[in-house]
Image: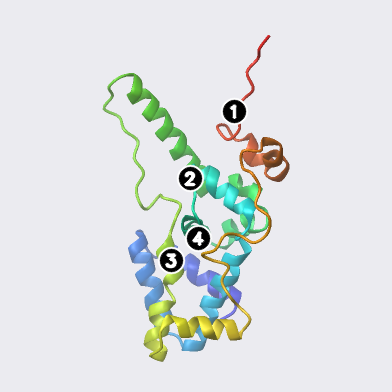
Amino acid sequence: MDVDGFWTLIEQSEQQTSLRAERVAWLEERLSAIPAEEIVDFAGWWTLAANRSCTWDMYAVYWFLMGSGSSDGFGSFVSWLIGLGREAFETVADCPDAALEVPQIQHVLELQRSFAEDRATRGRRRTGRRVMWTREEWPEFELLSYVSHEPYRKATGLDVYSLYDVLKARGITSAFPSWPDGECWDFDDMEELVRRLPRVARYPGVVEPETSTG
């Protein structure tokens, strides 16, 4: 399986299903129908894609999108990013500051803003309107990263650690669930944020506007 075949499966799984559980099942079924070598290919392309996103700038995008973060949550966020498909992933993989160009990320930000506005309204007066997120909208999708495991076990009779060993023999190891490589930077440092992620920094709510004292 080449990289095009990998992305075709990822995108078809979204097109052919409506719920996340269905999507995972669809991918597991398709992977179970191909040789073990191609299942390893799929797992390898997944790992390489995820590793491209394991940077502190991407972690910052995740942090600002979610309002907080953790290493496990970051891995689930990257799985969600890959699940958006090749075009969306390529938009942000090497340029996290382009995240606001992705419609699904814009949708999450709109949900965040609506939730904050709703919470503020309910704090002032009683209202029947309440903004809620569904699990289908949440920008984390951990289970998607595991879809090759059961098909590999069925095809080989071996456990997932064997899959990791095969990938390692190919020179592929996962950067997760550890923290990104390189030097971390302070997300509260507005100058550094503007330097690294200028478009994200300009998004309302990320950087509070200065108030005039005159």
**Is 202 drawn above or below residue 27 in the view shown?**
above
x, y percentage for residue 191?
71, 37
- On-image quarter of the N terminus: bottom right
Local SS, label 2: helix
Residues packed near mark 3 inside 10 Å, few (<14), some (14 to 19) or many (20 plus): many
Between disc 4 and disc 3, whose residue precedes? 4
Between disc 1 and disc 3, whose residue precedes? 3
x, y percentage for residue 46?
54, 71
Q: Estimate the spatial distance between the alpha carbons at disc 4 and disc 1, rounded to whole Å.
A: 28 Å
Between disc 2 and disc 1, whose residue precedes? 2
Residue lying furthest top in this view?
214
Residue type, numbered disc 1: Glu
x, y percentage for residue 91?
63, 55
Local SS, label 3: helix
Q: Nearer the viewer, mark 1 or mark 3?
A: 1
Residue type, numbered disc 2: Met
- Please give left or right for residue 14 compared with residue 193 in the image: left
Q: Estimate the spatial distance between the alpha carbons at disc 4 and disc 3, rounded to whole Å.
A: 11 Å
Q: Which mark is residue 75?
A: 4
Q: Nearer the viewer, residue 41 or 16?
A: 41
Residue denoted by label 1: 208
